[in-house]
Image (cartoon, coloured by chain):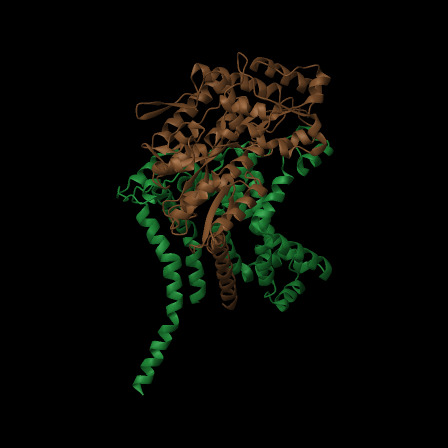
Chain colours: A brown, B green
Amino acid sequence: MKLTKIAAVAAASALALTALAACGGSSDNDAEGGSDTLTLWLAGKEDTPKKVEDWLVKEFAAQNEGKTLKVQHIDWGDLIPRLNTALQSDKTPDVVEVGNTQAATFTSVGAFTDLTDKLDQLGDDIGPKSFVEAGTFDGKVSAVPYYWGSRYIFYSKKAFKDAGIAVPTTLDDFAKAAAQLKADGGSKYSGFWLPGQDWRNGISWIFANGGDIAKQDGDNWVGTLSSPESIKGLTELQGLFEKATTAPKDGKDAEPWTAFNNGEAAMFMAPSWARFSVEEKLAKDLGGFALPGVDGGAAPVFAGGSNLGISAKSKNQDLSFKLLKLIYSDEYQQQLAKNGLGPANDEFTSLMGDDEFAKSAIAAAGSSKLTPASPEWASVESASLMEEFFGKIASGEDVEATAKATDAKLNDALNK
Amino acid sequence: MSSTRLTHRAGTYGLLVPTILVLVVGMAYPLGRQLILSFQEFGRAQQFGQPAPFIGLDNYRELVTDRTMWAVISRSLAFCAVCASITMVLGTAFAVLMKAVSTVPRLTLQISMLLAWAMPVIAAMTAWQWLFDTRYGLVNWLLTKVGLSDFDDHNWLIEPLSFFFVAGVIVIWMSVPFVAFTAYAALSQVSEETLEASHLDGATAIQRFRHIIYPTIRPILTIVALLQIVWDLRVFAQINFLQNAGGTPSETHLLGTYIYSLGIGQNDYGAASAMAMFVLALTLVLTFRYVRSLLKEESR
């Protein structure tokens, strides 16, 4: 059968092609190495602004003759899997940025070089403290704060004025304002843009009511999403999902400003740098305030930001530390602050400005909280456990039952 | 004389060395590693240098007693069966159509299918995701325009069944061209004389397809179907992409994404390897009959 042979050859080549295509995915890691090049992994496309990054590359080359700094950008969603495989290989990046809540995953297995003895070379009083703690395991500091950001509310001044609403001062007022804005705005309009699976913003309601994701009980982590405080927050949140937003129930926290730019939302919640993604013609209309607490003041929100670590496998330990020192230099810290990123050296926090945005950011950061400091937390994130949980709350499922079920999953995942 | 023959023979075997090397490096090593991993406790600590203890069949036991695995397996089998059969039927139908129409429409068909086949998965997925977007998607807009107002802001990915409908449409769209082209090539081997003769004898189009065309192209369709089953069983990129776009990952895992989430996502490489061994066994069971009939065909 000649035909069979043709088919077999066709099939074999098709298979070979897929195999090759599968290999192709990882080849971008190859062309590195050589101790003249230092590799820095930054998370997100432009979370570190381009011009700040350019300054770093130029200054590094100027200070270290014959050496170059190569910056690679890793998407947040890929970061954990990429670090899992890269940090233990011979082609490890030298210095990496890692989300503050993800640091424990790597410090707990010794993936980063211990920096405890060198900490004073980076500055007298580096912070925020919670970030230093997030980078500490067994008393050893191996991931240091890079920048902090905090989530606050962006709003349309015009929409507030048209509806005759003042900036809310309690969480309850906020919910009422959001519902009224939506009722006034029509079927496509969101008083408050809140996608269902956006747990990083939604968690603020749990925190504000005194709840938490999980707490440590001896050696064990216990999920506390079904504690009375958390349930109260989640119930309020479900009310918002129902009455205040038209965002997709399975939407995540990516690009929350899109609806605002399209004139389809009066408010959204995002880290400080989101301000620069709002369309220029709307900039005048844009205002900001920290999410109010239950009894006024600023509600505790999720502390965004990241840490930096030197890969323990890196062959350029000294040069890597020089890069850290450069990042901790006054010039670089000032540039971070001017771009709305909270600097590790709090001398420069004031450079973030004194407009309402900077004030909101600093107020929100003052009472911000982190996720459980378990080394297994990253697994919870990659399994999308929190996304699914908040999505279900958004879809109107029973709060208490869903919270209990998710607590059980958290107990499993955090105590491996 | 004998020494030249010996060199000659050594040379012949020498020619096999590259092939064997490629097979050993590309297949035997990963498979062996996977087999060993599946009997080990291998998590993040092991990845960063801790010794990996052997734990016998624990990984397998954990998987078998977990309902998730069975759900994932049955979901994958159902998805594979539906996608592979629709793909085969559509692909063959397109091939027959290409044979029947004149040059211009045929070329148009061929080019558009070639483009669909050549499109990089991630680019295609981005376009598909936009088509099915809840707020700004073309599909919802069209359905609303024709009067189905329920589809205003309809969420396609949040319900698992609807999620798999979208995933199925995309997977089938991507695989039909290959089947169509291969079947078209096969159709060109069907003897015109026989067809003409049967025509004269009064055979209908359906009879001609069933008794002449189908038997001729059957061996090729068998191989393509076999490939299709393997491909649809280990579909990964499309599902992973849609899971990132929305939906509920834990309710929409197929074999590929489940293994990925166990291994790369949650650092349980032992369990992931054990799961991958299951998939290997499953693929062998599913395709065994085809491979055997293929070998028979070959030796005839």
User: Is residue A119 shown left or right of residue A350?
Assistant: left
Percent position (x, y) of residue A16?
48, 59
Q: Quarter-wise, where is residue B149 in the image?
A: top right
Above or below: residue A38 compared with residue A9: above
Q: B272 or A185: which is nearer to us?
A: A185
Percent position (x, y) of residue B293?
44, 58
Tell me the quarter of the image containing the C terminus of chain A. top left
Q: Residue at x 38, y 38 (%)?
A: A106
Q: Is residue B235 visible?
A: yes
Callout count? 0
Percent position (x, y) of residue A57?
52, 47
Above or below: residue A190 compared with residue B170: above
Percent position (x, y) of residue A282?
70, 30
Residue that lies at the very extreme toward the bottom in this rendered image: B1
Above or below: residue A375 compared with residue A163: below
Q: Is residue A263 visible?
A: no
Q: Quarter-wise, where is residue B180 in the image?
A: bottom right
Q: Residue at x 45, y 28 (%)?
A: A128
